[in-house]
């Protein structure tokens, strides 16, 4: 049976880390509500494409306009079964929003599945939910994880790690592993 999943997005969240999980979770029968503070259903966020081209850090290019399908001001986190936090630059400013932080904390207090990728760890650290947790993230976010009381999982860019109800990964190349582990937490069974 499909779950009801909340995805908290923000302007310049990473394009793949927003669109791929959104579409994948819909494709396997879940309901996903993508929201952004200050925006309503039908409005869009601008995304950014972070690419790995051999430089010391990722490059950033303008992505797509991603359409939100729910209004942040109308959501009740208690009505959702799970949470997805895309990476990119959105989490950096989303962690400053008290209502976003409260929503994130709800999923940890209620022990509901949470999937965060790349810079999503910045929002987790800002919500102070990493104490005693193992969490992967983009390597530049290692200090966010550690200062937030977590243990940074230094894993390959195409891998993911699960710690209780939390699934994290370094970046979008980990989508197959990250989404598979999240689907397991959701109890999703895919048969051929």
Image: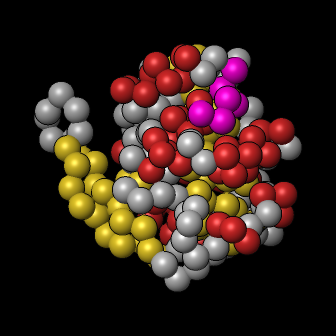
Instruction: Work out whether 126 lies above or below 90.
Output: above
Residue 152 screen position, x and y as percent: 52, 19
Query: Visible in this render: residue 184?
Result: no
Instruction: Work out whether 111 lies above or below 131.
Output: below
Query: Visible in this render: residue 44?
Result: yes
Residue at left offset 32%, top offset 70%: 64
Q: Quadrant of the C terminus?
A: bottom right
Residue at left offset 52%, top offset 58%: 9
Residue at left offset 67%, top offset 46%: 98
Q: Quadrant of the N terminus?
A: bottom right
Residue 104 screen position, x and y as percent: 70, 45
Residue 177 screen position, x and y as percent: 51, 43
Report if residue 48 lies within the magenta region.
no
Query: Principal SS element in the magenta part?
Result: loop
Please give left or right for residue 67 compared with residue 182 in the image.
Answer: left
Instruction: Work out whether 94 lies above or below 34.
Output: above
Residue 97 screen position, x and y as percent: 60, 48
Query: Over which residues does the magenta segment extend?
Result: 126-131
Residue toward you, 56 or 176: 56
């Amino acid at each position: 049976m499909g779950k009801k999943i909340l995805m908290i997005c923000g302007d310049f969240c990473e394009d793949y880390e927003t669109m791929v999980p959104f579409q994948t979770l819909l494709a396997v029968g879940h309901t996903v509500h993508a929201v952004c503070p200050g925006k309503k259903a039908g409005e869009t966020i601008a995304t950014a494409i972070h690419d790995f081209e051999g430089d010391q850090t990722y490059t950033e290019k303008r992505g797509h306009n991603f359409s939100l399908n729910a209004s942040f001001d109308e959501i009740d986190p208690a009505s959702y079964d799970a949470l997805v936090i895309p990476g990119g630059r959105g989490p950096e400013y989303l962690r400053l929003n008290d209502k976003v932080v409260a929503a994130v904390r709800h999923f940890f207090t209620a022990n509901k599945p949470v999937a965060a990728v790349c810079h999503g760890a910045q929002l987790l650290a800002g919500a102070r939910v990493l104490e005693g947790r193992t969490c992967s993230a983009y390597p530049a976010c290692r200090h966010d994880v550690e200062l937030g009381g977590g243990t940074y999982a230094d894993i390959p860019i195409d891998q993911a790690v699960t710690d209780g109800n939390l699934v994290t990964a370094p970046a979008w190349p980990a989508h197959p592993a990250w989404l598979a582990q999240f689907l397991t937490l959701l109890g999703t069974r895919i048969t051929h």
